Amino acid sequence: MKQNNNSRRMAEQAREKLGYIMLFEVADPALDLVTLTGCEVSIDKSVVKAYVSCDAARYDKVQEALARAKGRIRSLLGRALGWRVTPELVFVIDTTVDEAEHIATLLEDVPESMHIEKDEFGYPLTEEIPEDVDE
Protein backbone atom coordinates (compact mmCIF):
# COMPACT_ATOMS: atom_id res chain seq x y z
CA MET A 1 0.00 0.00 0.00
CA LYS A 2 1.09 3.53 -0.59
CA GLN A 3 2.22 5.12 2.68
CA ASN A 4 2.71 8.63 3.98
CA ASN A 5 3.56 9.95 7.45
CA ASN A 6 -0.07 10.05 8.55
CA SER A 7 -0.80 6.50 7.39
CA ARG A 8 2.37 5.25 9.13
CA ARG A 9 1.21 6.88 12.37
CA MET A 10 -2.24 5.36 11.93
CA ALA A 11 -0.63 1.97 11.19
CA GLU A 12 1.25 2.12 14.48
CA GLN A 13 -1.98 2.99 16.31
CA ALA A 14 -3.81 0.13 14.56
CA ARG A 15 -0.98 -2.29 15.38
CA GLU A 16 -1.16 -1.44 19.09
CA LYS A 17 -4.94 -1.79 19.26
CA LEU A 18 -5.02 -4.93 17.12
CA GLY A 19 -2.27 -6.53 19.20
CA TYR A 20 -4.23 -5.88 22.39
CA ILE A 21 -7.42 -7.30 20.85
CA MET A 22 -5.69 -10.44 19.60
CA LEU A 23 -3.98 -10.98 22.95
CA PHE A 24 -6.85 -10.31 25.36
CA GLU A 25 -10.17 -10.30 23.46
CA VAL A 26 -9.94 -13.27 21.09
CA ALA A 27 -10.15 -16.65 22.83
CA ASP A 28 -9.52 -18.97 19.88
CA PRO A 29 -6.90 -21.60 20.83
CA ALA A 30 -5.78 -21.77 17.19
CA LEU A 31 -4.50 -18.20 17.57
CA ASP A 32 -2.18 -19.02 20.47
CA LEU A 33 1.46 -18.23 19.73
CA VAL A 34 0.56 -15.94 16.84
CA THR A 35 2.56 -12.72 16.67
CA LEU A 36 1.39 -9.51 15.06
CA THR A 37 4.51 -8.31 13.23
CA GLY A 38 3.16 -5.18 11.56
CA CYS A 39 0.29 -3.24 10.03
CA GLU A 40 -0.24 -1.09 6.98
CA VAL A 41 -3.14 1.35 6.73
CA SER A 42 -4.41 2.69 3.43
CA ILE A 43 -4.33 6.45 3.02
CA ASP A 44 -8.13 6.72 3.32
CA LYS A 45 -8.10 4.39 6.40
CA SER A 46 -10.50 1.95 4.74
CA VAL A 47 -8.14 -1.06 4.78
CA VAL A 48 -5.76 -2.37 7.44
CA LYS A 49 -3.34 -5.05 6.27
CA ALA A 50 -2.10 -6.96 9.32
CA TYR A 51 0.96 -9.18 9.11
CA VAL A 52 1.03 -12.14 11.51
CA SER A 53 3.75 -14.68 12.17
CA CYS A 54 3.41 -18.23 13.43
CA ASP A 55 4.99 -21.66 13.15
CA ALA A 56 5.32 -22.79 9.52
CA ALA A 57 3.34 -25.97 10.15
CA ARG A 58 0.32 -23.94 11.33
CA TYR A 59 -0.08 -21.47 8.44
CA ASP A 60 -3.35 -22.93 7.15
CA LYS A 61 -4.84 -23.43 10.61
CA VAL A 62 -4.02 -19.86 11.66
CA GLN A 63 -5.35 -18.43 8.39
CA GLU A 64 -8.66 -20.26 8.93
CA ALA A 65 -8.88 -19.09 12.56
CA LEU A 66 -8.23 -15.49 11.51
CA ALA A 67 -10.92 -15.75 8.85
CA ARG A 68 -13.39 -17.02 11.48
CA ALA A 69 -12.53 -14.27 13.97
CA LYS A 70 -12.24 -11.44 11.43
CA GLY A 71 -15.72 -10.01 12.06
CA ARG A 72 -15.31 -9.83 15.83
CA ILE A 73 -11.80 -8.44 15.57
CA ARG A 74 -12.97 -5.83 13.07
CA SER A 75 -15.83 -4.63 15.28
CA LEU A 76 -13.58 -4.43 18.36
CA LEU A 77 -10.92 -2.62 16.35
CA GLY A 78 -13.47 -0.13 15.00
CA ARG A 79 -14.56 0.76 18.54
CA ALA A 80 -10.99 0.92 19.84
CA LEU A 81 -9.68 3.16 17.07
CA GLY A 82 -12.55 5.62 17.00
CA TRP A 83 -12.01 6.44 13.33
CA ARG A 84 -14.90 7.61 11.18
CA VAL A 85 -14.66 4.43 9.11
CA THR A 86 -14.18 0.92 10.47
CA PRO A 87 -11.39 -0.46 8.30
CA GLU A 88 -11.60 -3.73 6.41
CA LEU A 89 -9.08 -6.24 7.80
CA VAL A 90 -6.73 -8.22 5.58
CA PHE A 91 -4.56 -10.76 7.39
CA VAL A 92 -1.31 -11.83 5.72
CA ILE A 93 0.99 -14.55 7.02
CA ASP A 94 4.49 -13.08 7.46
CA THR A 95 7.02 -15.70 6.36
CA THR A 96 10.19 -13.61 6.69
CA VAL A 97 11.30 -15.36 9.91
CA ASP A 98 11.00 -18.78 8.30
CA GLU A 99 12.85 -17.59 5.20
CA ALA A 100 15.65 -16.16 7.39
CA GLU A 101 15.95 -19.50 9.24
CA HIS A 102 16.13 -21.32 5.92
CA ILE A 103 18.92 -19.01 4.68
CA ALA A 104 20.83 -19.42 7.96
CA THR A 105 20.60 -23.21 7.59
CA LEU A 106 21.92 -23.02 4.04
CA LEU A 107 24.81 -20.82 5.13
CA GLU A 108 25.87 -23.36 7.77
CA ASP A 109 26.52 -25.96 5.04
CA VAL A 110 29.48 -24.31 3.30
CA PRO A 111 30.92 -26.15 0.26
CA GLU A 112 34.58 -27.26 0.39
CA SER A 113 35.44 -25.00 -2.55
CA MET A 114 34.75 -21.93 -0.41
CA HIS A 115 37.85 -22.68 1.70
CA ILE A 116 40.23 -22.61 -1.30
CA GLU A 117 42.14 -19.35 -1.59
CA LYS A 118 41.16 -17.45 -4.74
CA ASP A 119 42.43 -14.43 -6.69
CA GLU A 120 40.44 -11.28 -7.43
CA PHE A 121 38.65 -12.97 -10.34
CA GLY A 122 37.58 -16.03 -8.33
CA TYR A 123 40.14 -18.47 -9.72
CA PRO A 124 42.11 -20.74 -7.33
CA LEU A 125 45.61 -19.50 -6.50
CA THR A 126 47.12 -22.99 -6.30
CA GLU A 127 47.47 -25.06 -9.42
CA GLU A 128 46.22 -28.47 -8.37
CA ILE A 129 45.98 -30.98 -11.20
CA PRO A 130 43.43 -33.70 -10.62
CA GLU A 131 44.98 -37.18 -10.40
CA ASP A 132 42.62 -38.81 -12.88
CA VAL A 133 43.53 -36.48 -15.81
CA ASP A 134 46.15 -37.93 -18.21
CA GLU A 135 48.44 -35.60 -20.11
Image: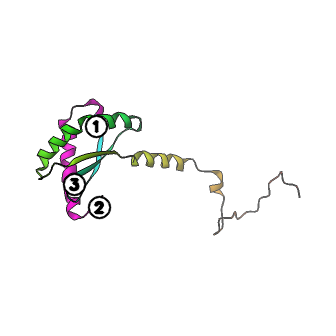
Q: Amino acid at mark 2?
A: Lys
Find out whether residue 22 is within the magenta segment: yes
| Pointers 1 and 2 in contact (C-beta within 8 Å) | no
Q: Amino acid at mark 3?
A: Glu
Q: Residue furthest top?
A: 29
**Closer to the eye: label 1 or 3:** 1
Quadrant where the image shows the C terminus: bottom right
Mark number, residue 67: 1
Q: On the image, numbered disc 2 is attached to which residue?
A: 2
Q: Residue furthest bottom?
A: 120
Quadrant where the image shows the N terminus: bottom left
Disc 1 versus disc 3: distance between alpha carbons? 22 Å
Q: On the image, numbered disc 3 is attached to which residue?
A: 12
Magenta: main secondary structure equals helix
Residue under the image location 21 percent in, 54 percent down: 12
Q: Where 62 falls versus 5 (above or below)?
A: above
Residue under the image location 18 percent in, 37 percent down: 72
Badge 1 local density, few (<14 within 10 Å), some, or many (20+)?
A: some
Its colouring scheme is rainbow
Badge 3 local density, few (<14 within 10 Å), some, or many (20+)?
A: some
Looking at the rendering, the stretch of residues picked out in magenta corresponds to 1-30
Residue under the image location 68 percent in, 64 percent down: 123
Q: Position of residue 107 (x, y in %)?
A: 53, 50
| Pointers 1 and 3 in contact (C-beta within 8 Å) | no
Front one among 124 and 106: 106
Q: Position of residue 134 (x, y in %)?
A: 88, 55
**Secondary structure type for disc 1:** helix
